[in-house]
Image: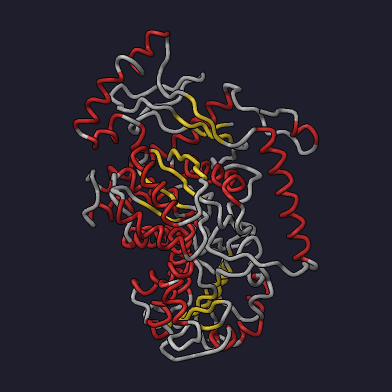
Amino acid sequence: MYLSTPVGGISGTPTGDVGIRQSPNSPNVSAKVLIKAPSVNDFGMAESVPAPVEGGREPRRRSRPRGASARRESETDELGRRAVELSRFYGGKIETVPKVPVRSLRDFALWYTPGVAEVSRAIHADPELSFDLTGRWNTIAIVTDGSRVLGLGDMGPEAALPVMEGKALLFRWLGGVDAVPLPIHATAPDAIIDTVERIAPAFGAINLEDIASPKCFGILEELQKRLPIPVWHDDQLGTAAATIAGLLNALTLTHRSVKEIRTVLLGAGAANIATARLLLALGHDPHRLALVDSSGILHAERADVDELSVRNPWKYRLALRTNGAGRTGDLASAVAGADVLLAASTPDPNTITPAHVRSMARGPIVFALANPVPEIWPDIARAAGAAVVATGRSDFPNQVNNSLVFPAVFRGVLDARARSIPDEIVLAAARQLAHHAADLGLSSDHLLPTMEEIEVFPHVAAAVADAAVREGIARRRLSHDEFLHRAETQMGRSRQLVRALQRAHLTPPMPRGGPSARRRSP
């Protein structure tokens, strides 16, 4: 089946066939992207599809699994085999089709020459009209060099493409956003920056994806300076926002304050460096915050600190600012007496041990976010005394995943036609996500909404749009209720279109596993 982009503005409903009725005042006349997806349950969510696994982690060979770990590894392997079969069957996840009526060849005089010339003249006179007269208002680019794909490492742009297609599916399904996957043959930061700058006029926002640390930091910062549209690196900002949202509720459950806790971040890659920055923005005492990487606790006197000042200035600045207690050594030294451990590091369940957890403060908070295997299994962490445990996986309670953040953030910045995505917007998304979970009822097994609680996404989008207006970076200034209505309509249309295409038999049903899955080849 397919997920379709909206047909213009926030109105329009699907008809019974391939055509989609468009609002007569809609300015959008560009193509729409249809995204193939599995069957849909009563929540409007795809069935039999694992949640995406992403985040700023550096891969390392895992130890051989045993027992329950072996079973989980076997399930992961089976999902991978099935994904290859279905990718061959469907020939990818997205395709482009017209989004405007074509009743006869005469209509091409409107959509193309000669009518389109007047549209070009209007935009030439006022480039901002590109957001009204084309699909730019709802279209983003997902750009990657393939240098850090999921937990797989440097896979190159071609191997990154299926991940970017999956990302595009999530953007459309959860956020109502048209996303174009763009893996590029460019590895040097300057080359990536130059490429994105050149393609930016076609898009309303840019999502950077799966770019290795530390170059991802400089690329993001430079593009944010150069472009008049939002630029986001999901491995940094999406994962960090989800982590902050989960942590805020974990602190509520354990009666702690962000201004008083002692926190250890295990891993100093894209996700945790962004998380550290957001924690400091929330008022976390930098002296009670420590980062641990493969060389141990990050601090100002570490032997490689001068090298970091050149190779990774983002990590260097945190080395100077954090760890006020002057601790040195490894993770064991860092976590002794700590309230919170946020791990985004090595996908190995022996990375964090029960002894580490037992050494922490009473009833500690442990987030083990590595994918596909967390740094410690949740049941082991709880048995060692953890009061609240979260992972990046959907098959355990408390999944902390950037898929809870990026669709709504982009919906909000596109609806507000924001010029950028500052940290204030990231924190607005995190707070709203946390607030929604709290409204539904917090527990040690329910820190955040799940991807099935789709009602949260429009509210996060509206909070993001509101923040853009407050920060003075919105081209469009609407009320909260207007932003919420736009988000609900845009996001809801995806599920309507999926069902309409199913009823019209335009979507091949998902085949059973086995050889039959290979019959339909592009």
On-image quarter of the C terminus = top right
Residue at the (80%, 34%) spot, across then down = 515
Q: Can you give x and y, in whole percent of width and height, for residue 100 in the image?
A: 40, 21
Q: Give the quarter of the image for residue 426.
A: bottom left
Quick one: which residue is furthest to the left in this view? 125
Q: Can you give x and y, in whole percent of width and height, for residue 516 in the image?
A: 78, 32
On-image quarter of the N terminus = top right
Q: Give the quarter of the image for residue 149.
A: bottom right
Camera-nearest residue between 256 and 472: 472
Q: Can you give x and y, in whole percent of width and height, for residue 350 in the image?
A: 69, 75
Residue at the (62%, 85%) spot, across then down = 358
Q: Is residue 71 left or right of residue 144?
A: right
Instruction: Please tell me whether residue 37 is drawn above or below residue 362 in the rendered image.
Output: above
Instruction: Please tell me whether residue 310 is drawn above or below residue 491 in the rendered image.
Output: below
Q: Give the quarter of the image for residue 482.
A: top left
Count of marks overlaid on the render: 0
Q: Is residue 219 left or right of residue 335?
A: left
Residue at the (23%, 30%) spot, across then down = 124
Instruction: Please tell me whether residue 205 is drawn above or below residue 100 in the rendered image.
Output: below
Q: Can you give x and y, in whole percent of width and height, for residue 386 in the image?
A: 59, 78
